[in-house]
Amino acid sequence: MADPLRNETSIPIRPSATPALDEQSIDQLLAGLPSSADAPLHGQTNPRLNRTAESIGSALGTTVGRVRSGLTLVQKRERELARDLSETVSQQAENLSAAVVEKVDRITDVAEERVSQFTRALNEEMGVLRFRAATRIKELRKQAATARDEHPVEAILVIAGAAFVLGFALRVWRSGNDY
């Protein structure tokens, strides 16, 4: 039981306003029990007060239980939401990764196809150029043979002139590099 209230202040309390306050506890005052000066407390019970206290205690206990249960439910739901969010993020990351891999594969396939097309076109063009070069070389050989057969002196003079010009150019170039 709670300690009785005592008048420890220097302000005097009027006895007519609060009868026997010094000898009665707060619990007794709140319960409306008579003061210790009026009747002894041992053996006295107030059934209405007991029922009210039991009702309040029961309601308070039920409320605390419900709050704890609610907190447990909230925590459980929070864990479920966190797990669901984690699974959703993981699934979206996997989907995004798969989409990126698919795009890269498509780009690689397109690039390989383009390289293949370019290589084929280049090989075809090289074949055409080889054919043209071979044809031109044959024509030049024919012209050179014709020029040699029809104009042998002029052919020798052209070869000698070309050799002279080439020799002169090499000599100038060597003299410029002989530091």
Image (cartoon, rainbow, N blue to C red):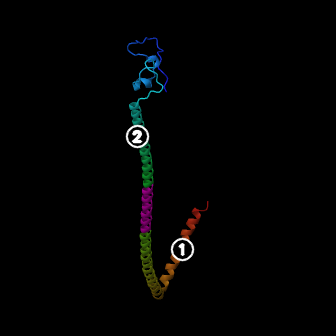
Disc 2 crowd rating (10 Å Cα; few below 14, some 14-19, many 20+) is: few
User: Regarding mark 1 in the picture, which secondary structure is present there?
Assistant: helix
Residue lying farthest to the front in this orientation: 43
Residue at the location (51% across, 82% down)? 156
Q: Which residue is mark 2?
A: 63
Is residue 83 magenta-colored?
no
Q: The C terminus appears in which quarter of the rendering? A: bottom right
Mark 2 vs mark 1, foreground winner is 2
Q: Toward the viewer: 120 or 109? A: 109
Q: Is residue 63 left or right of residue 168?
A: left
Q: Position of residue 109 (x, y in %)?
A: 43, 70
Q: Toward the viewer: 138 or 22? A: 22
Residue lying farthest to the right in this orientation: 179
Q: Which residue is mark 1?
A: 164
Amino acid type of the residue tagged 2 in the rendering: Thr
User: Regarding mark 2 in the picture, which secondary structure is present there?
Assistant: helix
Q: Quadrant of residue 146?
A: bottom left
Disc 1 crowd rating (10 Å Cα; few below 14, some 14-19, many 20+) is: few
In the image, the segment drawn in magenta is 86-107
Gap in Å between the C-alphas at discs 2 and 1?
119 Å
Q: Toward the viewer: 57 or 178? A: 57
Q: Position of residue 10 (x, y in %)?
A: 46, 11
Is residue 101 magenta-colored?
yes
**Which mark sits nearer the N-terminus, 2 or 1?**
2
Residue at the location (43% across, 52% down)? 80
Q: Position of residue 91 (x, y in %)?
A: 43, 59
Q: Position of residue 66 (x, y in %)?
A: 41, 43
